[in-house]
Image (cartoon, helix red, strand yellow):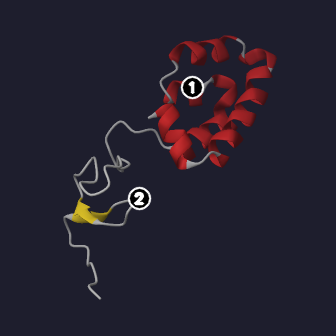
Amino acid sequence: MEENIVGDNEKYCTKCGSVITKEAVICPKCGVKQPSIGSSGEKNKVAAGILGILLGGLGAHKFYLGQVGTGILYLCFSWTMIPSLIGLIEGIIYLTMSDDDFNSKYN
C-alpha cells in the first residue's frame, strides 16, 4: 500500500484526501474548492465573538466584520444598553458557529 506523505508545499484535499499543492484553490482530482486558510483580510470568529461579548454595546464586532452602518447604529444607541445585550448574544453565536458557516457569511 502506497502512503502519501505531505511535503512543505503540499496539503491534503479536504474532500478526497489527495495530496495537492498548498496554493491549490480546487482539488484537481475531485474538483472540490479548498478553504482558504491564512488569507489576508480574513475575519477571525474568535476575535469577532470576544469583541461582541466585551464591546458589543459600542458595535466593535460590527466594525470588525465590516458592517460599519450597523456599528454606527449600535454606537448611537449604546446608552440604552440594548446593543450590549444584542452584542453579547451575537458574540456567543459567533463563537458557537462552525468555521465554514462563519467563513461563508463573513469572509
| Disc nearer the start of the sequence (2/1) | 2
> Disc 1 residue type?
Lys
Expressed as whole percent of the image width and height from the top left, the position of residue 96 reads 67, 48
Please tell me how crowded label 1 is: few (under 14), some (14-19), or many (20+) other residues with Cα within 10 Å: many
Circle nearer the viewer, 2 or 1: 2
Quadrant location of residue 16? bottom left
SS at badge 2: loop
Expressed as whole percent of the image width and height from the top left, the position of residue 35 reads 38, 48
Up-down: is 90 above or below 63?
Answer: below
* Foreground pick, 96 / 59: 96
Q: Which residue is mark 2?
A: 15
Which circle marks residue 62 in the picture? Answer: 1
In this rendering, position of residue 55 left or right of residue 47? right
Quadrant holding the N terminus: bottom left
State if disc 1 and disc 2 touch (CB < 8 Å): no
Which circle marks residue 47 in the picture? Answer: none
Up-down: is 6 above or below 76?
Answer: below
The residue located at (73%, 35%) in the rendering is: 88
SS at badge 1: helix
Up-down: is 34 above or below 10?
Answer: above
Quadrant holding the C terminus: top left
Quadrant location of residue 14? bottom left
* Foreground pick, 74 / 5: 5
> Disc 2 residue type?
Lys
In this rendering, position of residue 38 left or right of residue 20? right
In this rendering, position of residue 41 left or right of residue 107? left
Expressed as whole percent of the image width and height from the top left, the position of residue 89 reads 75, 35
The residue located at (64%, 24%) in the rendering is: 58
Calculate the distance from the C-alpha at mark 2 to the C-alpha at mark 1: 33 Å
The residue located at (19%, 64%) in the rendering is: 9
